[in-house]
Image (cartoon, rainbow, N blue to C red):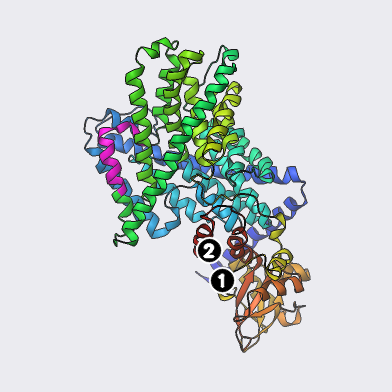
Amino acid sequence: MSASGEQRHSSYKMWLRQVAALVNSVVLRLGYVERWLFISTVTAITASLVIGIFYWMLQGLILLSAKLHGLIIHEALTDYSLIAIHSREKLLIPITLLLGAAASSLIVYTFEPEAEGAGAESVVEAYHFKAGNLRGRIAAVKTIASALVLGTGGSAGPEGPAIQIGGSVGAFTASSLHLGIEERRVALIAGAAAALSFIFQSPVGAAIFAAELLYEDVLEAAALPPALLASTIAYALSLHILGPEYKLPSLHITNIISLYSLSALGSYIVLGLVEAVFAFAFVKFFFFTKRWFDSFVKEKGLSIYLKPVLGAIMVGIVGIFVPAILGTGEELLSSLLSAFVHLQGVRSLVAMHYNLLLILLILALMKMIATSLTVGSGLSGGLLTPSLFIGAMVGQLVGIILGQHIGVEPVIYAYIGMASLAGAAFKAPIGLAFFVAEIGGTPALIVPALIASLTSAIATRGVTFVTAALKKPLPPTVFTAESLLQMLRSGEVKRINITILSLVKRFTPVNWHATLRDAAKIMVQTGQKIIPIVDDNNRVVGVLDPAYVGLDLGYMMRSSQPVIEVSLINAPIVRENDPFIRVLEEMVAHGVDYVIVVDRSYRYRGVIVFEDVAQALMPYIAAGIPEKAEASEQISEVARR
C-alpha cells in the first residue's frame, strides 16, 4: 500500500472510531428503555438479515438435493424429508448426507471446532463462563456447516445456528458500545431471543425461552425486557423475510369450555408424564450417542474429521427405510398437523387409530435416533425443532387414546405435546407454553400447555440438553474488580489454576521518544484504548490513556509532541511470575480495568484487561453454584476450553 493509501486508510479507520465513540457516548446517556431499544433494534436487524441468508443457503441446498434425486420443486423448501419421501432413488439419501457431512466436517474442524453440535449450549456457556463473549467466527462457521447438514438430509433444527448468530450479534453490539460485562451478557440473550423469534415467529415465547434457558429452575428476569424488545422487532422482520405465517397451521378451537374441563385438565397432566418419558429418553440417548462417537476419536484413534461422516452414514441408512425423519421436519410436521386438523371429530381417528398409533410411535422414536446420531456425531444443527416434532407425534398419539373419552380434539394434544417435551428437554416450560400458543394461533392453549410442560419438566428434573445451565444465578456483584478480589481473599473461590501469562494480550507499546501522532496511528490500527510507553530498554515508564488525560484522537493525529511530555498515568504493573491475585489488587488500587505485565527485569510483556480476568474466573465462581454430581466435571471442562 502506498503512503497516501495508507494515510487514507488510517483516516477512514479514525473516522469510524470517532463515529463509534460518538454513538457510544449518546447511548450511554440514554435511559434504560431507550438504550435497550437501540441495542435490541441493531441486534434484531443484523441477526435477522444473517439468518435470512442462512435460510437462503438452506433453500438453495434443498433445491440442489432435489435435482440430485431427479425431482423438480416449484416452491422454496427448507425440509429435506419431503425430498426423501418423494424420491424414487432412496439409495441417494446416504450419498447426499455423506457429501454434506464431509463438507461440513471439513469446514468446522478446520476453522472453528467449537461450532460442532447444537447451538443453545454454546450461548449458555458464553453467558455463564465467558463473560458474555461469543466469537462471531463461531456463528459464521456454524451457519455454513448447518446449511450443508440440513440441506443434505441431516436430522436437526435450524435454531442451533440461529441462536448462535443472534447471540454473537448481541454480544458484539454491546462490546462495540463498550458496555460492561453484565450488559453484554443481557445483549447476548436478547440476540438469542431475536433469532428464535425470527424463525418461529413467536416473540413472547422466544423471549421467555431465552431467559429460562440459563438456569434449571430460575428465569433471568434482568434479560427478559431486552429479550422481548429484540424478539418483537425480529418477529416484524420475519413477517417480511420469511412470510406472514409460520409453517405450522393455526388452531381454531370452538369449544373452549371442554378444553378447560376437569377431565381435560387431568389429561394434560397425563400427557406431561408420557412426554416426560420420551424427553428423558431423548436426552439420555443423545448424550450416550455423543459419548459413543467421542470414544471413537479418543480411544480408537478415528480422525475427528471422520466422526461426523460416520454419523451421517448411519443416519442415511436409517433414512432409506424411514425418510420422514430426515431434515428439519418443519414442513412435514406442518403437513401432518394440517391433516390432523382437518380430520373431523374423534371418531374418524378411532376407526384408523391402530395403524396411526404405530406410525406416530415409529416417527417419534426414529426421529429421536436420527437426531441423536446427527448432532451427537458432531454435525451442526439444533435440537429444539426435533424436540417439537417428537413432542407433536407423542401428543397426537396420546390425544387419539384419551380424546375420545374427554371430547378434546387429538390435534390439540399434538400442540400441547410440543411444549411438554421441549419444555422438559430444555427446562423452559413457561417459554414453550407461550411459544406453542403463539404458533398455534390461540391463547387458549397457554394454560393446557403450561400444565403439561411443567409436569414433564418437574418429572425430569436434572435431565436437560443444556448442561451449561446453572442451578441458580450468580451474585450480580461478581462483575467488578473489587468483588472478585474480595472473593479471592475470603477463599470463596478455590483451587484457581490461572497464570498471569495465560491472560496476557500483546498491546503494541510506543517508545517514549515517539510522537502523539505515532501513538494515535497505533490506536487506530489496533483498536487499543491505551498505549504502554516504554524506554529504550523496553522498560515500562507509564501508560498513555487519552480518555483519562482528555486527549482528542483528532488532535493526536496532528500532533508531533513526544509522548514523554504528555501526562502519563503511573502504570499498574505486575510481574509475570506474581500470584494471580496481584492483577486484581493493582486494578483496584489504581482504579483502572487493566494492568501492565513485565518480566523480572521490568521489561514490557503485555496487558491484561478486566474482562479477561472475569471470564477466566467465571468457571471457578460458578463451580459452587450447580447442585448436581456433574458440576465439577462441567466446570473443569469449561475451564479447559
Look at mark 2 in the image and give the residue it sits on.
639
- From the viewer's perspective, is 434 left or right of 404? right
Distance from disc 2 to disc 1, alpha carbons, whole Å, reads 9 Å
Q: Which amino acid does label 1 sit on?
A: Asn
Is 610 above or below relative to 626? below
Residues rendered magenta in the picture: 311-327
Q: Say whether residue 318 is magenta.
A: yes
Tag 1 secondary structure: loop
Mark 2 Cα within 10 Å, few/some/many (few <14, many 20+)? some
Look at mark 1 in the image and give the residue it sits on.
497
- From the viewer's perspective, is 77 left or right of 219? left
- From the viewer's perspective, is 82 left or right of 51? left
Name which residue lies at 36% across and 48% down.
289
Residue 438 occupies quadrant:
top right
Q: Nearer the viewer, residue 451 or 502?
A: 451
Q: Which of 596 and 629 is in front in this view?
A: 629
Q: Residue 363 appears at what percent x and percent y? A: 35, 30
Q: Residue 551 appears at what percent x and percent y? A: 75, 69
Q: Residue 254 appears at what percent x and percent y? A: 56, 12
Contact (Cβ within 8 Å) of mark 2 with mark 1: yes
Q: Which amino acid does label 2 sit on?
A: Ala
Disc with the residue nearer the chain's start (2 vs 1): 1
Q: Can residue 252 be seen in this view?
A: yes
Q: Nearer the viewer, residue 263 or 551?
A: 263
Q: Residue 634 appears at what percent x and percent y? A: 51, 57
Residue 611 occupies quadrant:
bottom right
Q: Say whether residue 618 is magenta.
A: no
